[in-house]
Structures are given as structure tokens and as C-alpha cells.
Image (cartoon, rainbow, N blue to C red):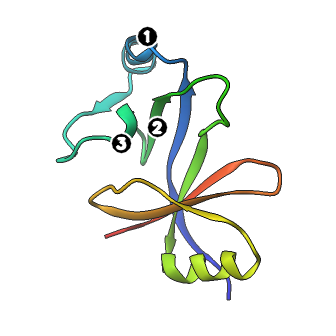
Amino acid sequence: MKIEFKRLDHIMLCIPIGKEQEAREFYGNILGLKEITDTGYALPNGAIWFQMGDIQLHIRAEDAHETSQRHPAFEVHDLEAARKLLQSHGIELKNESKIPDRNRFSFRDPFGNRIEFIELI
């Protein structure tokens, strides 16, 4: 069984706590990205989302002493099959906070990088 990747859904970058307005200024006004404000639901963990071509850029504040939550998120076909494959290799999965239009989980690669898999519903 192989994981069938559909596309890159989003990239999440992190900023220092309290710098949200500066992030909006940089990504929205300087880079010219359109902020996504009408999702129909509250964004998780105070995130700020921008449209960036056919993918999204997610920004979230984090404490510099935490293990970074920066990550790419890949849309996959058959999220449950991907879950089972990773678990069969002893990879620890983390169920992420609920977002109404997607199922998702994350994991760390052998080098500590966070990777998220999602399936749109």
C-alpha cells in the first residue's frame, strides 16, 4: 500500500506571540496575499490564513521554547488507509483540532519535522 498524495494544501509558518498584526501587514499588505476571513467557522488556535495561488499559507503564534508547529499539509486520498500504513510502521500520530471541512492528523518524521495529512469532506 502506498499513500496517494493529491496536492499540497497549505504551509504553516509560525510567528512570535503578539506579532499577529505585523504578520497581517507583511503577508497581506506587503506581499499582497488575500486574508481568508470567511471560512464559516473559527480558525483553530488563533490562526491567520492567506490564499497563496492554489494553496493556503497559515500563520500561527507560538512560544519560541515550544517544539515548532511549522509544517506542510498534504491532502491525501483515503486518510484512514494512510493512518493505518503509518501506524504499521510504528509512527506516532496526533489527532489535530477539528475543522469542519476536513479530517486530519499529524506526525513527526525521523528528524522532528511536523507533517500533516488531511482529507477534505
Q: Nearer the viewer, mark 1 or mark 2?
A: 1
Q: Is the residue marked by circle 1 packed among few (<14), some (14-19), or many (20+) residues within 10 Å?
A: few
Disc on res. 44: 3
Q: Is residue 119 left or right of residue 67?
A: left
Disc on res. 22: 1
Q: Which residue is mark 2?
A: 57
When the figure is inspected, residue 104 is found, relative to residue 30, above or below; the finding is below
Alpha-carbon span between mark 1 and mark 3 = 19 Å
Quadrant for the N terminus in the image: bottom right
Disc on res. 67: none
Q: Is residue 106 left or right of residue 65?
A: left
- Position in image of residue 77 (x %, y %): 49, 77
When the figure is inspected, residue 84 is found, relative to residue 14, above or below; the finding is below
Marked residue nearer the N-terminal end (2 or 3): 3
Quadrant for the C terminus in the image: bottom left
Q: Is residue 96 left or right of residue 116?
A: left
Q: Nearer the viewer, mark 2 or mark 3?
A: 3
Quadrant assignment, res 88: bottom right
